[in-house]
Each structure stands twice: as C-alpha cells, then as structure tokens.
Image: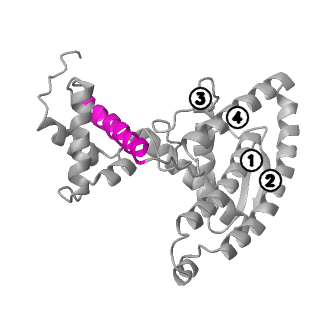
Amino acid sequence: MDPDPTAVKMRLSKTQMSVIWPGLHFLVLALLSREKFGTCEFAYPFQIFPLPRGFDDGTYRSAMTDCIRALWIRMKPIATTGGRVQMNSIDIRAAIFAARINMQLLRRRVHDARRKDAKTKKTLGLGRAAIKKRKQQTGPVIKSLERNLKRATRSSLKTTSRSEFAQMSKEWRSHLRWMKFHLAYFKQVRVVKGRGIVHRMVIDQLTAIAEKAIRYEGFEIPDPRELRNVVRLFVRYSRRGRIWKFHFRYMLQNGQRRAAQEFLFEFVKKRIKLKENKKK
C-alpha cells in the first residue's frame, strides 16, 4: 500500500495510547456489531424514542469507516507500548473522537454503577477519582492531537484544493454525527413516567423484534393486533417466571442476537398460524 502523501509523522507515548486506543477499539467493535446484528449496545433507541421529522442524525460514509479500520490496524502493534505512526487529517480527527469516547464510556460506566457500594466501586475503578484522573489524561492528549491536526491540514492543502478539503471535512462531520447516534450514544434516555406508556413501549419494541425474526424465517407478518396479543402473553409469562432464560428484559437488551430472535419466533409460531412467504 502506497504511503499517504498528506500524512504527518507522530510519536505517541504509552500514556497517550492508553487514552486513544480503548475508544478506537470500541468504535471498531461497535461497527462490527452493527454489521452483524444491525445495531450495537450504545446506539440511540430510535424505535422507542423516534427523532423529530427532519432531524439530522448524520450520514454513513464507507470511506470514513475504512479510514478508521485502517487506523486501528496501524495502531494495534503500539497499543500497549506507544510508538511512531503516520496519520492524515481524518486519522487524527478519528483519534480525537476516540479519546473523547474513552472519557464518555467511563462516565457511563460510573453512572451505571452508582447503586453499588463504595468498596465495589473502588475495586472496579468506577469512582469519581477515576473520572478526574481520566480527565487529566485526556485533556493534554486532545490538545497534542489538535496541534498535529494543524500540521496535517497544511500538508493536505498542499496536494488538494481548499474546496476539496472543505468537502472532505463536511463529509467527516456528517459521518461523525452518524457515529455519535448509531455507535456511541452514551446519554441516558429520559425516563417516561406512566406505567401504561412504558408497557406500550416494551410491547412495540418486542413486536418489532418478532417481526424481524418472522421475516428472517421466511414467513409473512400476521395480523398486527394478533401478534401484539401474543407478545403481551410473552411478557406476562416472563413476569410470572414461566420464561427465565429469554426473559423479556433480556430480549429488549439482546434483541439483535439470533438465539433470542429464534426463541421469540418459536413462541409466536406455536400460537399463530403463520403463512410462508412465497415471494423470493
């Protein structure tokens, strides 16, 4: 592979890599999960809380994804030791985003562990002291990357016109927005008050999982009202302890897994006569 003429040489220390690498590795794993299952753990819940009409959640760019994967391959040998690496402007922007993801991911884990006792938090490294230490490490790393980003920008402008560079930057910002919603949405979704509203949201999400499983198995979607009644029965059985392995709460969190979809499909198939889809 020919070297990128716009790339600049950098040396990343062990401490800097400890800030950048976890976030970059998280991004690549999230991309793989989305390609395999159609979603990932920290994606925005579009089915439960649809975005307003016309809201811009970014645009997926395959070229930007390829750049991130190539950067992951180049950085893997120096992930734990640090070392020299060549990065262009897109690579450096991805590294900055990875450093911020590492910080946000720690904050989310600390929030999720807020009900644990102090001893457990200290053992897991999920206290306020951990956030303070990570913040002190992340700030200087981002500033260093931003200085090198200026070098990479000047290098890019030597070989490309300003309009082409502006278009590339615009595409990156759009892809960055897409990643924030589809791969790395760490904000806590607002709690909806009202038992009936929450119950309807649960039924809606489980029905969507059931429809996906039915289509995958090659059957037509049955009457929506009949399907929702079976999904309600599934939730009722789960709450009464008649279903333990694939509880409806597990299904909501792992609905992209084939084993979970197959279980819900078999549950529906036993109670509704499904018609095979004759369309190829």
Type of colouring: one colour
CB of mark 3 within 8 Å of CB of mark 1?
A: no
Q: CA distance from mark 3 to mark 2?
A: 35 Å
Image x and y of residue 101, in percent = 64, 54
For image coordinates 19% across by 20% down, the residue present is: 277
State the mark number for residue 43.
none
Mark 3: amino acid: Pro
Q: Judge whether 79 appears above or below 217 on screen.
A: below
Q: Which residues are magenta?
A: 195-215
Q: Is residue 237 above or below residue 60?
A: below
Q: Which mark is residue 172?
A: 4
Give the mark, 3 or 1, whose residue is nearer the N terminus: 3
Q: Residues within 10 Å of mark 3 (few under 14, many from 20)?
A: few
Say which residue label 1 marks.
Answer: 92
Q: Which residue is mark 2?
A: 145
| Mark with earlier residue (3, 2) | 3
Distance, label 1 to label 2, CA atoms, is 6 Å
- Mark 1 touches mark 2? (CB < 8 Å): yes
Using the numbered discs, state the Cα–Cα distance from disc 4 to disc 3 in whole angstroms: 23 Å
Left or right: 228 in relation to 156: left
Q: Earlier in the sequence, mark 4 or mark 2?
A: 2
